[in-house]
Amino acid sequence: MAKIDYSKYAKLSPFELKDELIALAQSKTDRMMLNAGRGNPNFLATIPRRAFFQLGLFSATESEFSFSYMPEGLGGFPRPVGLQQRFDHFVLENRDKAGVVFLGKAVSYVRDQLGLDPDKFLLEMVEGILGCNYPVPDRMLRISESIVKEYILREMGVKGMPKESLDLFAVEGGTAAMAYIFNSLKENKLIDYGDKIAIGVPVFTPYLEIPELNDYQLEEVLIHADPNLGWQYPESELRKLEDPSIKAFFLVNPSNPPSVKMSDEGLAILADIVKKRPDLILLTDDVYGTFADNFKSLFAICPENTILVYSYSKYFGATGWRLGVIATAKENVLDKKIAALSKKDKAELEKRYGSLTTDPASIKFIDRLVADSRNVALNHTAGLSTPQQVQMVLFSLFNMMDSRQDYKKAVKSVVRERDAALYRQLGVDVPQDPNAVDYYTLVNLENTSRQLYGDDFADWVMKTKNPTELLFRVADETGVVLLPGSGFGVQHPSARASLANLNEYQYAAIGDSLRRFADESYQEYQKIRKKK
Ligand SMILES: *Cc1c(COP(=O)(O)O)cnc(C)c1O
């Protein structure tokens, strides 16, 4: 391999660096590139997808009962009369098909366990999957919202909160949620140019970039998780949030890339801070919550202060579906802050939302999010497509109906076994931590060197080895693409691997490659030591 000047890569974002690494990894044609840089899982939930397609076929037939005297291919709206009977018949006729069996059970579950009206549910699903009406209500379809609320409350560890006391907005994934939220916070003057916003790091890099955009020009206060505390936020870091000039705290929990959930101690400190700072807005991206053991969201601790974002992308292997939700409590600090704005600001906002109702001041923040997502004027066409909402409901039901949680156990063990394979080949202990989620792993250069060949070697590595060189060598020699932790705000040299998107033997290959690098470095180190 030709000598490369690694310093020229220093300014690239990890995702740009990734392109360079991919080019190198692919440069040898006789092998496959292993990209462990991406978070896209290589597993997916099939039963709720089978259910979706079967429901689609049933619904198309329902539609064709109308206008049946017309040429083929023209249908009408499904008819509610007798729908349940025809559906039962369909389930009976197709009881050898897993997707149909699931649909039959889903209707029973919705009726018998969730206590919802099965006729309304079925009609909402059939109309929804046909996509023959605008989403009404635009924030989320009614029964769908009720079901997804149940899922969110359970999976986010929220206890003692009635379903009536939260609202959901169904959106095109977690990243769309973030874009909508930043925009509406600004439009509603809850954050303004130059305001301070705290961000928990390390973090998914685009989230560091949004607040710096020209649109927002926010000042970032970084809340650093400590690798020596298993990547928890130390109390001293969290206490920075007591500064009243910080408007909001934005974090990914469980984190990306350290992939640990916030500990109970951390949550308790945050609850205490919110007591002192009841105006603090918490914005939490909990997409990895479903991979954690006993997960508890900030929304469970401080519901009035928290905007919760959840995405179906990772857990159900559904990045292409674009499914996510934003949740806020009915009683929340956002609406209170809007009500407390200056007369001038309020007048401006009443004008902005004046076309929606005769009492625009009463519009809740979450409904402002919906309106803002279509520049207010096009509010009547806002909302997530109805077939997407149907798939979201089927994913949620699939998880809730699985009383033994077999799917959850399966996906968790998939990522954890990959983690074990990587560290086994590297020859160091797998980091053990009850808060670990193991969707990603950060291989720490210093700790690994220390565990393999001792303190003096580790110090030498830190002085002489460029972590970027490690990434390029690994890409060149093995075709494995890892990303530098530094790009995510990790302060110690490290390599980040997603444990979601390759197969176990490939993680073993990554471990082998890292081990080779360590062994060669050790030989080099020994030669230098002997000369002295
Ligand atoms: C993967 C990921 C998401 C998912 O975003 P979608 O838009 O729902 O696909 C959200 N947040 C973080 C931190 C992620 O890593």
Image: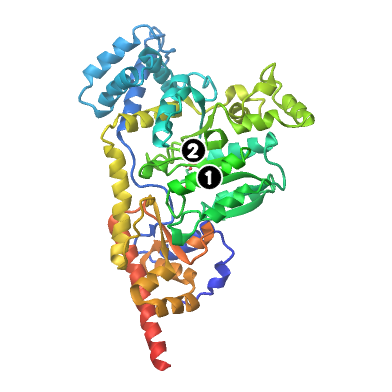
Given the image, on which type of amino acid does mark 2 rest? Ile
Query: Quick one: 472 or 110, which is closer to the camera?
Result: 110
* Residue 483 rendering spot, x and y as whole percentages: 46, 60
Residue 270: image tag: 1
- Residue depicted at x 34% and y 70%: 515
Q: Secondary structure at mark 2?
A: helix
Given the image, on which type of amino acid does mark 1 rest? Leu
Query: Quick one: 404 or 432, which is closer to the camera?
Result: 432
- Residue depicted at x 29% and y 10%: 85
Residue 301: image tag: 2
Q: Is residue 169 left or right of residue 495?
A: right
Among all residues in the image, which is located at the extreme left?
A: 96
Split into 4 quadrants, where in the image is the C terminus? bottom left
Q: Is residue 236 left or right of residue 289?
A: right
Q: Is residue 109 left or right of residue 486?
A: left
Q: Are marks 1 and 2 in contact (CB under 8 Å)?
A: yes
